[in-house]
Image: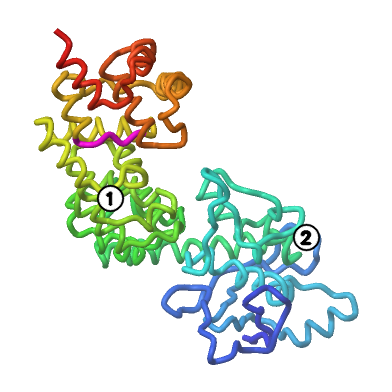
Amino acid sequence: MHESLIAADAHGQGLRSLRAPAASPVLGPSPDGADLTLSLECRLDKHARNGERHDVTIHRDWRVTTPHDLEAERIAAAFGAYTSCLSLVEETVPALRDAMPWIARATSAAPHRHGKHRWRLPAATHVNGCCRDRTFANLADAISHPYQVSHLTRRWKAPAWQVTAVITAASARWKAWNQERATLLDAGRFVRGADGVESLWALGVRAEDVVELAAPLQLVADPLPVPYFTHARHGRVDLEWVSAVVAGRPDANFAAWLVGLGRRFRRTDPQAWRHWLEFGLSLEDVMYAVENAGPPEVVREIAATTGWSLSLAARTWLDWVRVRCRPTLSHFEFIARRGMAHSVPSNTAIERAYELAAAHHTDIDVSSPEQRTEVAVMLTLLGTVAEVVFEVEQGTHTVKQLDSTRKETP
């Protein structure tokens, strides 16, 4: 048996001497630092369709052992001879090593989002005529592409049949190892679905990742959906923030939804999320409230002033915020007294009433959010834009004045 004197460069930039530098940990062809031995055809003609089989071993440090004297075969190749074992050492094993982080689901190998629903490979992986300008709609396709035969043979010019053989052997070994690790770690109990761990492997998430990513959510009793793990693994998620928010609603589906949010939400206050969640709002309403509705304490103040439930107070407050108005507690007292909690006017109606009111009363400032809110609440209480304009013409341009006027009217 003979060992090659050549090993593939880890970044696919040609060939280097026998061993990688000791200071750089090497990701080998097989898990747990094991060698990868496989039976491979030995073809003596570049155009041959088959050949005699023999074992070859790809060692953990990427040396290759074959039954041949490869140095002698290099000399013969210089005079026109061909052996596929030489191609194995100089082209195919470097291609395998290049693809190894993706086959092993190493943390350094991950696509990134391109837009909302697509994925793109890191620039170092791109190959002209293959994936340089390509995006992937499917995460599994993005994960597997760097070790597809078509990709590797463009990148390394290695024989397709040989690349297929070594990639298949290495992929099967790493996948089996992941299943072994999943059993040992009992990773399956954290993932929803009988085939959850296997599905996650196809999406670039290892058994160890499953356990690590589930650890911050110990308050969630049920198994987590597959999308939770893919977002957490590939989305640069702050799991401490997720854990703090999920404490307010320890639900597996909520956790999966939360990790899929954009990065801007991860700068919001987890306590604010927890308070808004307590009001029984939909997740979309909570998300809107955290970004736009201010401190959640206002809901409790509204409920105390009006006698409404916290849920009704929260929904009504958000309805007003959505039309760019922030009524005071006095306003809500007037609204509650009239039984008009659900009568929030449309933004179009508010704009029309405000525009006409400002045209009839010079004291109404079109740049004032407070006065815009006054007009909007008057519109709620009166019901029509015409009624608002009539009251403004009579000199009434605040809710308090309107309330006094109505009390004085027999």
Residue at (34, 25) in percent of width and height? 376
How crowded is the residue under tag 1: few (<14 C-alpha within 10 Å), some, or many (20+)? many
Report the side of 297 relative to 109 (left or right): left
Query: In the figure, 147 relative to 14: above or below?
Result: above
Residue in the foreground of this view, choosing between 383 and 53: 383
Residue annotated with mark 2: 48
Residue in the foreground of this view, choosing between 260 and 312: 312
Query: In the figure, 272 relative to 285: above or below?
Result: below
How crowded is the residue under tag 2: few (<14 C-alpha within 10 Å), some, or many (20+)? few
Report the side of 384 relative to 249 (left or right): right
Residue 28 spot, x, y in % from top left: 52, 77
Say what secondary structure mark 2 lies in: loop
Q: Which residues are magenta?
A: 325-329
Say what secondary structure mark 1 lies in: loop
Res 49 quadrant in image: bottom right
Residue annotated with mark 1: 224
User: Residues under labels 2 and 1: Cα distance?
Assistant: 51 Å
Report the side of 80 relative to 147 (left or right): right
Q: Quadrant of the C terminus?
A: top left
